[in-house]
Image: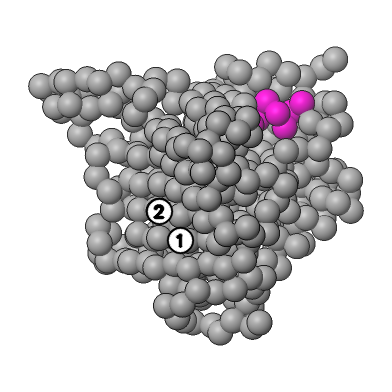
């Protein structure tokens, strides 16, 4: 059987991780094309990674590349257009978080893929990260009794690309960028797409990136699920010293702590510093945690391998567009909660152009 052909949309940090994952860990897939809006960058990315074709226009990258799968690693405001174009062209789709900018876009994307009978996967790598999967399996075995509290923290000093800081392109800050991971992981941990009852959140800006952005740099989000179970997501763009990603799960019969990165690193001391330590590490002088197999430990190869298997074997993805939409709804409620200072009950809907409008107060929610 021939390899499944992939068109990679994007050439930033996450696209580098995806191409490494395909080329090292997914032998049944071949990346045959890359798209990015800058022609020079598209050509350079293709040359660097040995990709046959490059495009600087979105539609031709999807319709003329000969791909079977479209892998979307683009800025958030382009997600809906890319998905609907791919579905209409008969392509299967896997998309990086967050799903899109609005719930209306989410519904359109899901409907487009269903209408075309194409598979649509929401690429939440924490559902595939080996260490976190071990945590989930321990919980399922009953190792810590009944879960009543979960905590997920992801913090660093800010994203690589400028578009993240532009609310019109990103839709929000630390919550949109990283809080979506925790919210998706809570649902994954509890299993069976649990019903969320309410959301409470607080947010801060003007911390480390003053004058550069109006989006939130620090967020705390508390979700109450059915059965009284609580999930706490803490996310920050103002934390120095490199990426921090950890989880805690509390049960009636025990507790589990797991650190995604620090436990998979070599503790290093360097007087002069060195090249790359870990994502967002900054200076490498003095003591640092030197990461290895970064993509594998975070679950990227596993999620991409899973989706290619779904396409080749006609299986449903474990994480779907509907899951991405549920996470987006939780983030809507979180932004509104941060504005009004109160718990927001679910379900929740608002007519906005981007989620952060619900915090900035630029448009009013509609219940």
Q: Depth check: 69 or 290 in front?
A: 290
Distance in Å between CA atoms under marks 2 and 1 = 7 Å
- Residue extending farthest to the front is 253
Contact between labelled residues 1 and 2, with CB atoms less than 8 Å apart: yes
Residue 281 in percent (x, y) is at: 28, 35
Q: Is residue 295 left or right of residue 263?
A: right
Q: Name the dominant secondary structure of the magenta segment.
A: helix
Task: Indicate the quadrant where residue 204 lies.
Answer: bottom left
N-terminal label among 2 and 1: 1
Q: Depth check: 38 or 197 in front?
A: 197
Q: Quadrant of the C terminus?
A: bottom right
Task: Indicate the quadrant where residue 264 lies.
Answer: top left
Q: Quadrant of the N terminus?
A: top right
Q: Is residue 317 left or right of residue 265?
A: right
Vertical comparison of 5 with 320: above or below:
above
- Residue at position x 34%, y 22% in the image: 265
Q: Depth check: 342 or 217 in front?
A: 342
- Residue at position x 55%, y 45% in the image: 147
Q: How packed is label 1: few (under 14 Cα within 10 Å), some, or many (20 or more)? A: many
Question: Is residue 305 a member of the stretch shown in magenta?
Answer: yes
Residue 226 in percent (x, y) is at: 64, 59
**Quick check: can you spot residue 284?**
yes
Q: Depth check: 82 or 343 in front?
A: 343
Residue 79 in percent (x, y) is at: 64, 54
Q: Which residue lies under the disc numbered 1?
A: 221
Q: Which residues are magenta?
A: 303-309
Question: Is residue 263 a member of the stretch shown in magenta?
Answer: no
Residue 273 in percent (x, y) is at: 17, 24
Vertical comparison of 3 with 35: above or below:
above
Q: Label for residue 234? A: 2
Instruction: Determine whether the residue tagged by mark 1 lies in a helix, strand or loop.
Output: strand
Q: How many marks?
A: 2
């Amino acid at each position: 059987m021939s390899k499944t052909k992939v068109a990679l949309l994007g050439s930033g940090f996450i696209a580098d991780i995806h191409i490494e994952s395909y080329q090292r860990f997914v032998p049944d897939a071949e990346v045959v094309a890359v798209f990015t809006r800058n022609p020079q960058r598209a050509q350079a990315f293709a040359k660097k990674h040995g990709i046959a074709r490059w495009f600087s226009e979105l539609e031709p990258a999807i319709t003329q590349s000969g791909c079977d799968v479209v892998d979307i690693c683009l800025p958030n405001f382009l997600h809906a257009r890319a998905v609907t174009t791919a579905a209409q062209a008969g392509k299967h789709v896997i998309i990086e978080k967050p799903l899109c900018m609005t719930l209306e876009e989410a519904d359109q994307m899901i409907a487009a893929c269903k209408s075309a009978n194409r598979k649509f996967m929401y690429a939440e790598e924490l559902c595939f990260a080996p260490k976190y999967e071990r945590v989930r399996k321990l919980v399922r075995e009953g190792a810590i009794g009944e879960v009543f509290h979960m905590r997920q923290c992801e913090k660093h000093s800010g994203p690589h690309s400028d578009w993240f800081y532009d609310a019109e392109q990103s839709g929000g800050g630390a919550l949109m960028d990283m809080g979506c991971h925790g919210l998706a992981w809570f649902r994954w941990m509890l299993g069976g797409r649990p019903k969320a009852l309410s959301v409470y959140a607080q947010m801060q800006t003007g911390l480390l990136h003053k004058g550069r952005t109006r989006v939130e740099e620090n967020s705390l989000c508390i979700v109450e699920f059915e059965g009284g179970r609580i999930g706490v997501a803490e996310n920050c763009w103002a934390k120095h010293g490199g990426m921090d990603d950890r989880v805690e799960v509390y049960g009636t019969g025990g507790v589990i702590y797991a650190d995604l990165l620090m436990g998979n690193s070599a503790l290093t001391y360097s007087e002069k510093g060195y090249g790359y330590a870990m994502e967002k590490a900054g200076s490498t002088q003095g003591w640092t945690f030197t990461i290895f197999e970064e993509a594998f430990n975070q679950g990227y190869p596993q999620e991409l391998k899973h989706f290619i298997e779904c396409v080749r074997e006609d299986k449903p993805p474990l994480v779907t567009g509907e899951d991405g939409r549920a996470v987006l709804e939780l983030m809507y409620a979180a932004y509104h909660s941060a504005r009004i200072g109160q718990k927001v009950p679910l379900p929740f809907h608002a007519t906005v152009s981007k989620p952060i409008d619900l915090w900035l107060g630029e448009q009013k929610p509609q219940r």
